[in-house]
Amino acid sequence: MRSIRGFTLLELLVVIVILSLLAAILIPKFTGRVEEARIKTTKVQLKEIKRALEMYRIDNGRYPTTEQGLKALVEKPTTEPLPKKWKQYLESVPKDGWGNEFIYIYPSDKHPFELKSKGADGELETDDDISVWDE
């Protein structure tokens, strides 16, 4: 007769403990990487939008107004001031790494325009906001 050998309860418990320890070590590292990737993605998108805004200004002599918003980079604005030499500067207006819309204000007090993300918490004017002007 053939004997059927299975895992003992002790062997199963040892495997479960090892897997739990690995999960406890690796999950925080992957979670941190996801957040880091969202921040980097947001910064790249901010730079790309800034580049498109600069091209808009070169072509039209000014940046889009706050009312026209970033949509002016995708569709020709229908509100004053109408752009003189408009063309499509972006395929679509991207969202930040957390799926939120970017904040665009023109004119701005400190810079030619304000362009930023609300960051991970989705709240404006908090420590995790990311501005295109941040180093």
Image (spheres, rainbow, N blue to C red):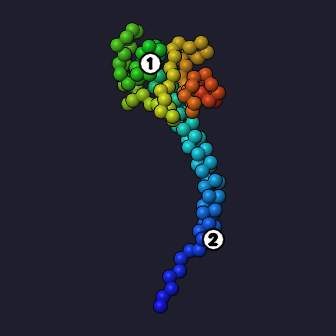
| Closer to viewer: mark 2 or mark 1 | 2
Place of residue 63 in the rendered image (x, y in percent of width and height, measured from the top left): 47, 16
Drawn side of residue 44 relative to residue 76, left or right: right
Label drawn at residue 69: 1
Residue type at mark 1: give it.
Answer: Gly
Point 50% across, 25% down: residue: 102
Place of residue 19 in the rendered image (x, y in percent of width and height, measured from the top left): 60, 61
Give me the C-alpha separation between circle 2 and circle 1: 63 Å
Point 47% across, 91% down: residue: 1
Q: Residues within 10 Å of mark 1 (few under 14, many from 20)?
A: some
Mark 1 residue element:
loop
Proximity of marks 2 and 1: CB atoms separated by less than 8 Å: no
Question: Which residue is at the front of the view, 110 or 62?
Answer: 110
Question: Which residue is at the front of the view, 47 or 96?
Answer: 96
Quadrant occupied by the C terminus: top right
Point 48% across, 88% down: residue: 2
Residue pushed farthest bottom? 1
Drawn side of residue 53 relative to residue 119, left or right: left
Residue topped by disc 2: 10
Place of residue 79 in the rendered image (x, y in percent of width and height, measured from the top left): 37, 11
Question: Which residue is at the front of the view, 94 or 83?
Answer: 94
Residue type at mark 2: give it.
Answer: Leu
Position above or below: 6 against 19: below
- Quadrant housing residue 15: bottom right
- Quadrant housing residue 84: top left
